[in-house]
Image (cartoon, rainbow, N blue to C red):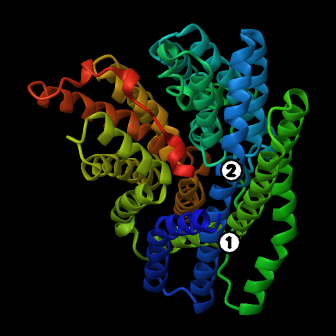
Amino acid sequence: MKENIKGKLKESVFSIMPIAIIMIVIGLFLKFSIVTIVSILISTILLMIGICLFTYGVSVSMIEIGKSLASSLVKTKKPLLIMIITFCVGIVITIAEPDLLVLAEQMTAIDSVTLILCVGLGVGIFFALASLRIIYQIDLKKFIVVFYGLILALMFLVDKSLVPISFDSGGVTTGPMSVPFIIAMGLGFSVARSRKESKNDSFGLVAMCSIGPVLIVLLFSLLVKGNMIYKYNIATETRDFTNLFLNYSEAILPTLKEVGLSLLPILILFIIYNLITKKIKKAKLKMVISGLIIAFVGLSLFFIGVNVGYMKIAYLIGIKMVANYEFLLVPFAILVGFVIVKVEPAVAVLTSQIEKITQGSVSKKIINTIIAFGVSIAIAISMIRVLTGISIIWFLFGGYLLAIVLMFVSPKIFTMIAFDSGGAVSGTMTTSFLLPLIIGVCYQKGGNVMTDAFGVVALVALSPLITIQAFGILYNIKSKNMLDISKIDEEIIDYDWKCAYE
C-alpha cells in the first residue's frame, strides 16, 4: 500500500508542478501579494496529496466494483437488466464526478443540481446504450453519426447562450471518478464474455458517455426561455495571512459534506450489489471500503485546494493580464495548452497505447506533441473568442463535422482512440484552472460569460478527435510499405486505461 501511494504521489507531483510553476511565475510577474503566492503553494500541496489519495482510493475501490458488477451482469444474459443497471450506474458515477461538480459550482445561471441531474441522466442513458452496443456488437460509427448529427442540428434550435455549457458538460463528465469505473466495467464485460467477442468491449464506452450530457442539456435548453446571464462572483486578492488561513479552514466542513454526498450513492450501490450477489470476499470488501474512505479524503483535499486557491487565482490572473498584458494572453494560452496535456494522467496512457498498437514505430514523444498541439490550438481559439466575441457555434459545428468525416477515412483504431480520449484530455485542471482564467478575461473585457467564456472544455475535448484521426491518416499513408495499420487485428489490442489508476 505504501509503495502504491508513494507512486501515486510522485505522479501527482509531476502532474501539478508545471501548472504551479506557471502560476507562481505569472503571479510574480503580475505583482501578486506574498499572501497570494503562499496560497498557490498551499493549494498545490493540497492538490498533490488530494489527487494522490483519490487516485489510489479509486484504484482499490471503484475498479473492483466496476469489474465485479459488469462480470455479474454479463453472466445474467438479460439485456434489459443490463441496460437498467448500467443506466442507474451512469447516473450514480456522474453525481460523484469532481469535474462536473467544479463546473456546476461556476455555473450560476443554471441551478447546479439541475445541471448535474441533466448530465447524470445523459450519462445513464448512453451508458445503457453502450452496453446494448456491446451485447449486439453494433458499430460505434453508427451511434456517432446519428447522435452527433442530432446534436449539431439542435445547436441551431436552442438559446445560443446554453450551447457552450452543453458541450462543456460532455467534456467534464468523463473525469477521474467516471473514467476508471467505466473502463473497469468494460474490462468486466471482456472477462465475462468469450475471447472472440470480448476484445473490443472497452472501446467506445467513454465516447458514448460523453455524448449523453451534451444531447440531454441541449434538449433541456429547448425548455429554457430567454437569454441566460452568468452572475459574476467577483474575486479579490487576499493580502492578510489570517484571512487566507480562515478561508481554508471555513472551506473544510462544506467540502466534506459535498464530497460525502457525492460518494454516498456509489457506496449504497456497492452495498446493495454485495448483499444481492455476495460475491466479494470479506478481505476484498474491507479493501473496497477503505479505498472509498481514502478517495473521500483525497477528493476533499483536492476541492479545498481548487475552490480556495486555484480557481480564484486563475480568475485574478485573467483579470490582471487583460488590464496590463492583453497582448500576451494568446501566447500564454498556447503555453498552458502544452502544460495541461502533461497534467492529465490519461494522456500518458493514451500515448503508451498508440505506441503499442503501432508496434513502437510511433513514439510517445511524437504523439504527445501532436495532442499538445491540438489542445494548445483549442485553448488559443478559446482565448481569441473571449477577446473578440466570435460565436463558438461555428467552431463546434465545423470541428465535429470534420471529425465525423475523418472517421470514414481514418484507421478504425485511431477513430476509437480519438473519440474515447476526448473526455479524458479535458480533465480536472481544464475545469478548475482554464475556465476560471477565461472567465476572468471575459469579466475584464465586459463580455458575456455564457457565450464567450464557456466552451473552453468543449474545444479541448474536440481537439483529439481531429488531431488523432488526422495523424492516423498520415501515419497510415506513410507506413504502407512498413505496416498497414488499417489491417492490424484489433483483437490483439488491450486498451488498458486501468493502468493509469494502479
Q: Is residue 22 above or below residue 364?
A: below
Could you tell me which residue is drawn at 38 percent across and 53 percent down? 380
- Amino acid at circle 1: Ala
Residue type at mark 2?
Val
- Left or right relative to 285: residue 83: left
How far across and down, in percent of the image, does residue 145 sit?
47, 15
Above-or-below relation of 497 to 57 = above
Quarter occupied by the N terminus: bottom right
**In the image, 365: left or right of 169?**
left
Please state the total of marks drawn on the protein image.
2
In the rendering, which numbered label is found on residue 477? none
Q: Which mark is residue 60?
A: 2
Give percent across and percent down for residue 15.
48, 64
Secondary structure at badge 1 equals loop
Asked whether the viewer can see residue 314, the reply is: yes
Distance Cα–Cα, label 2 vs label 1:
38 Å
Residue at the farthest left position: 481
Front label number (2 vs 1): 2
Q: Which mark is residue 235?
A: 1
Is 485 in front, or is 493? 493
**Cβ atoms under marks 2 and 1 closer than 8 Å:** no
N-terminal-most mark, 2 or 1: 2
Local secondary structure at mark 2:
helix
Residue drawn at x 55%, y 17% as measured from the top left = 147
